[in-house]
Image (spheres, grey):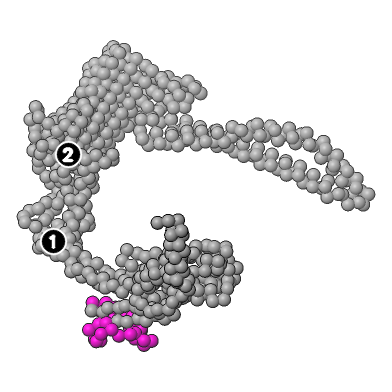
Amino acid sequence: MGLFDKIAFDDNSNADEQKDAKPEFKSVILESENIPREIKSIANVNALSVDALDFKILKCKTLYSDTKEEGWVEADTEKIKLFESEDFLLNPALKIKQSFKVEIFKKNEEEESVLPHIMLSDNKLLTRVIANIKQNIEVKYVSKLEELIVDEINKKKIKAGVFVGIHDANLYKEVKKIVASIRINGILDKDYSFLVCECIDPVFPINDDLKLYYKKKVKQEDDQGRIDYSKRGYILAVDVDECIIEYIKPKDGKAGRNCQGKYLGVANPKIEHEIIINTTENIIKKEDESSIRYIAQRCGYVVETGLNTFDIDDRMEVTEVSFRTTGSIETSMSSNVKINIQEADIFKDAIGPGMSVETSELNVQGNVGSGARIKANKLEVGGQTHKTSVIEAKNAHIMTHRGELSGETILVDRLEGGHINGVEVHVKQAIGGEIIAKNIIIDELISNVHMSASDKIEIKELKGNSNKFIIDPSVTIEFNEKIAKINEEIKDLTIKIKPLPTQLDDRKKLLEKTKPTINMIKDKITELKGDGKKPPAALLMKIRDFQGMVSAYNDLLANYKNQKAKIEDLRADLKEVQLKIFSAKIVNHSPWLEFNEIRFKLISPTREIIYNTKNHEIIREITLKQVGDEEFKINKSSEYSAS
């Protein structure tokens, strides 16, 4: 093909294009049930993007079909009221559709919009549609703004397939409020969010269920989320009035319909746990329309005495507590559960290594193993405790103790290097170890025992040495809390008054420096008044300012003195508290042996008064006596005091 032929071809091609060229799209009016589809079709035909087109709603037609009507029926002004009825909308046979007559046109990008930015959101089932309008200072009030906003929201609803004109009365009410605000304030001054359409949420059915609450009390995970496989819930303790079992009755659901007209059906409830539960008089049954609850009438633990038959017992016999058999046993301290562990073989552990037992009353006929932990209101241990065992009991009786023990009233037949922290502690024979208590009684004291008491240490027979007898008021929790509180108050007040002397000194110097000038001003004011002249306000203001400085100084000085007085009172209280040490005593019913140390600990001033016993000396009671302001001595008496 030659060059001219190519030019000729090109010319003919341009002529054909001009011949086939279509006029620019302006607008079209149509009626359809699917406006988004029509817009897309028109955009494709006219080589436009969908975003370049917009539409105006000219008419909305709602049609429905159900078993009562033949075919599709148009909902006129009267029949549209049917859609306000829940019974009408929840008819499964009901079908709803809408068609719209609209004008589709090309957007004029140069035309400035008066509308705010509007977004629609919905919930998961599309039973609620929310409009969100963003704050915009560019939006101003114009006539028909209310109509324009409603139309814009309705267009967005059409694009989302949401019904227009059904259950949307709130839309018009809220838009009216927003437009009124714009008219008053001149701008859209804040964000708005409101309901534009709401239909009927379905109510889902409740399936029946059997909840064994007493089994869910077992917590296998520790604080770090690790699983403790020793906690298997061997005993499931409960308290009075606690719900231990609950049968949740099945309940029918209720269908719904969403804002697109879709019927939201629900299934029938599942019934899989319905059984007949039998109980004794220790469990009562309470029933209402939603459930059947089984309530404990006594403290104890839940037992199954037969098929689906439950009772509550408060006594349990087990051979041993070990990882292999029961796992750890932990019940509430208030559950009143009494456990008897029968293993009495001296070569075996009744409570195995690492096991924990928590209950109201515990009787261990044998030994407590390494790392075992016990917590009880009342405890009996017929064997020995391992040195790494930890025991907490309000009332405890232990045959041979080697581990850690804390409680209130404690009796130990034989202490072998163990630790005891209690209120009233009685040890029949002590061979090494440590005892901290309010009162300590030891029937037979051998050697290497460290005793600290706030009130009294009493020894019936001393047979050894290297023992330490310490009277220390601070060993009791009550005393410690009181002392700590007083010391904390003294510390706080001391910190508060520390800067006050410097502040007082600075203010005093300023007052002394200013005073001559003030005296001159006072003389001048007196002179002016004598001449019948009114003193200038500036001079009177200087006098008032000085008086204010004096008043502030006096207030600060009074505050300083008050705080110092409080500190002195607290220190006096501290001394009063420690006076208890002078009524405390150490009693020994047998002759003393050498190398036993007596020690009295003072709190304020912090000091220790020490005495080392001599062989065969007869001292029945040892106390501390104050002989001067800060002078103390050990008082030794060969007689028993009356108290």
Question: Looking at the picture, how far across and down is residue 58, in whole percent?
Answer: 44, 80
Up-down relation of residue 627 to residue 296 (above or below): above
Neighbor class of circle 1 (other Cα within 10 Å; few <14, some 14-19, many 20+) is some
Which mark, by number, is residue 632? none
Position of residue 608 in the picture relative to residue 410 (left or right): right
Residue 440 forms part of the magenta stretch: no
Q: Can residue 584 be seen in the rendering of this structure?
A: yes
Residue holding disc 1: 273
- Looking at the picture, which amino acid does disc 2 mark? Ser
Which residue is at a point 12% across and 46% down the rendered structure image?
A: 315
Among the 4 quarters of the image, the one containing residue 70: bottom left
Q: Tell me if residue 167 can be seen.
A: no
Q: Residue at x 62, y 36 (%)?
A: 560
- Relative image position of residue 25 (x, y in whole percent): 46, 72
Q: Residue furthest right?
A: 531
Q: Which residues are magenta?
A: 65-92
* Residue at 14% in and 65% down: 271
Q: Is residue 66 magenta?
A: yes
Considering depth in this image, is 78 or 537 the residue closer to the camera?
A: 78
The CA distance from mark 2 to mark 1 is: 30 Å
Q: Return the mark for residue 230.
A: 2
